[in-house]
Amino acid sequence: MQQKVVLEVVMKCQKCRKESLKVAAKQDGVSYVGLEGQEKNKVVVIGDGVDAIKLTTELRKKVGHAQIISLVEQK
């Protein structure tokens, strides 16, 4: 089943946004990565078997503070 993970990440510049997309795209099972929100501060990841905890940890190491907003299974 596909999962949709929405994470809120503190991103202060365009370089941070680019880095967060790269980190998310490198995770196993990811089929879509994008930014949402008025300030482009939410990273949306859709994929099969995406590990949300591992993704959040990697974003914290590379970009800055990150937290999981939602984790939903898609049909």
Image (cartoon, grey):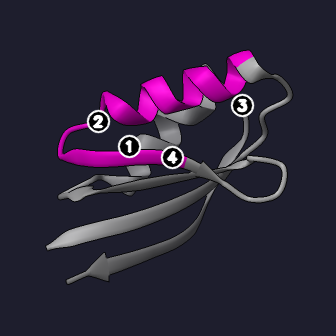
**In this rendering, position of residue 68 left or right of residue 17:** left
Classify 10 Å Cα crowding around label 3: few (below 14), some (14-19), many (20 and above). Answer: some
- Is-magenta flag for residue 6? no
Residue range in magenta is: 15-34
Q: Are marks 3 and 4 in contact (CB under 8 Å)?
A: no
**In this rendering, position of residue 44 left or right of residue 8:** left
Mark 2, residue position: 27
Q: Name the residue: 21% across, 69% down.
A: 2
Q: Position of residue 38 (x, y in %)?
A: 82, 57
Residue placed furthest toward the top: 15
Q: Between label 3 and label 4, give the one nearer the viewer.
A: 4
In the rendered structure, which disc, 3 or 1, sits on the residue that comes first in sequence?
Answer: 1
Query: Of the residues shown, which amino acid type is indicated by label 3?
Result: Gly
Give the numbered dot on residue 64.
3
- Is-magenta flag for residue 26? yes
In the rendered structure, which disc, 2 or 1, sits on the residue that comes first in sequence?
Answer: 2
> Compared to 6, does 16 lie above or below?
above
Mark 4, residue position: 34
Q: Are marks 2 and 1 in contact (CB under 8 Å)?
A: yes
Kindly report the distance in space between the C-alpha atoms of the residues bearing marks 3 and 1. 14 Å
**Kind of element beneath mark 1:** helix
